[in-house]
Amino acid sequence: MSFFQRFFGPHVSLRSPEMRVFWFLLPIILVVFIIDIVFLPYLWSFLTGALLVLISIVAFFISAATAKLNNEIQLERNKLKGIVLGLEDGIIVYDQNLVLSFFNSAAESIFKIKASEVLGRRLTPQDIESDKTRLLAQVMFPSLAPIVVPRSKPGEYPQVTDLSFDNPILELRVTTAPIADDRGKLLGFMKIVRDRTREITLLRAKTDFITIASHQLRTPISEINWGLESLSQDAGLSDNAKELAKNILSSSRKLMKLVEDLLNITRIEEGRFGYNFQSVDIVSFLDDVLAEIMPQVTRVGLKLYFDRPKEKLPQLTIDPQKISMVISNLVDNAVRYNVQGGSITVKVAPLTDKPYIQISVKDTGIGILPEDLPKIFSKFFRSSNAVKFQTEGSGLGLYIARNIVRAHGGEMWVESELNRGSTFYFILPTDPSLVPQKEIAIE
Ligand code: ADP
């Protein structure tokens, strides 16, 4: 490796195109130098000579440094191109006029179309009419796709959208991000298209299995429950036998609850839980729900308080049956994880800074381990202190409750202190336009 290459990198040489400026200048400088020597006095020819040498050196270094920089950019570009071309996700780049400038090989195989057929072309919604460009048009203009599920907030980048197609079955996740120059000027957009058909098909097969198994289990369990109920009231049975029948009935009811929870989870995850929204006065609604729960709370020696708001609250748009499931679950947990003689306080109050009503369920129970707080709303999760305290539980209730609240445009969270108690909060919008129009499948 020459000294020059050691200094400017192995791929730069005196013959690099960027060195042309120097080679072009060199003879001119030499000619001017000779003219100087011949026609100028000694001192002047020395000074201009030194200046010309300096210009030559500067021209040499600028040319060589430009060659080095261009070489580095080229290497980076090739590396990036190699990565993008080898990606399993389809990549489409287009400008603001929807003219395509990049289409990788994964995109070619997803859309079954060659890059050369679309590069430089402007896509329009009319492209949906041609078999060849139909799918590409539906991805470029998602409103044309049969099923569209937005996964990000409107107007927020990157935009993530799930698109489903029936014929042939295809599940695509499309992520759209803007491309801007260093000064933030918008140059175009990039779409990353992920083919999730296999993944979703496997997930559906699993969910279908749970749905069918749960449905099949429901009928025999109902019959067992019905039989045990009559048996436990049968006057002809001994007290021991009646007690036994009651215990089995209680276990059988828990089994039924588990099956119902599993069915509800599959419905929620597929986005078909079915919400019937109504305008409801939340305070009188909570009065009714709590009155129903009250006997269960007092039976175990706990106290239930309802902290009402001082002012009149606006009507809420909710599905009363689903929100009553949420309250029952929270109060049920506050009972099961409470200590002897403890209390439960349900409070409802408006938020001052947002159009929401906040409902909280506070207990004086065992609390939640700080490291478990982030996992508490996950499916099947049970905290180790809760498992020791209450052996029974599925870890499904809070997962269902939080999803119901989210489907109302709200949010749920918890604050807790170990051995002091927990408070579960959730908010519901008072403005009906904040309630999602459509149920969305979750993953
Ligand atoms: P389950 O109560 O059937 O286990 P949940 O989904 O309702 O299922 O609750 C999940 C877990 O959250 C519980 O197992 C427990 O660890 C914790 N948890 C819920 N509510 C409380 C509470 N009020 N106090 C302490 N821990 C709680």
Image (cartoon, grey):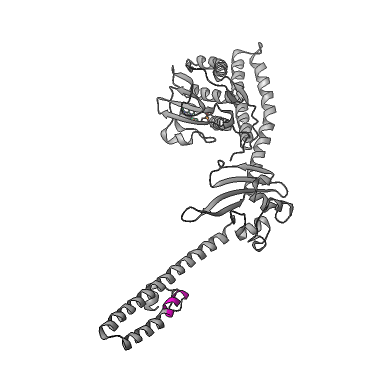
Instruction: State the residue in front, 233 or 379.
Output: 379
Q: Is residue 391 visible?
A: no
Q: Is residue 337 visible?
A: yes
Image location (x, y in percent) of residue 303: 47, 15
Q: Compared with residue 273, is residue 159 higher up or lower down, i.e. above or below?
A: below
Image location (x, y in percent) of residue 331: 51, 22
| Residue furthest bottom in the image | 38
Image location (x, y in percent) of residue 260: 63, 29
Instruction: State the residue in front, 287 or 317.
Output: 317
What residue range appears in magenta? 17-24
Query: On the image, which quarter does residue 236 sit in?
Result: top right
Would residue 214 appear left or right of 394 to someone viewing this image? right
**Quarter placement of the C terminus:** top right
**Quarter placement of the N terminus:** bottom left
Q: Tell me how many marks there are.
A: 0
Image location (x, y in percent) of residue 254: 59, 25
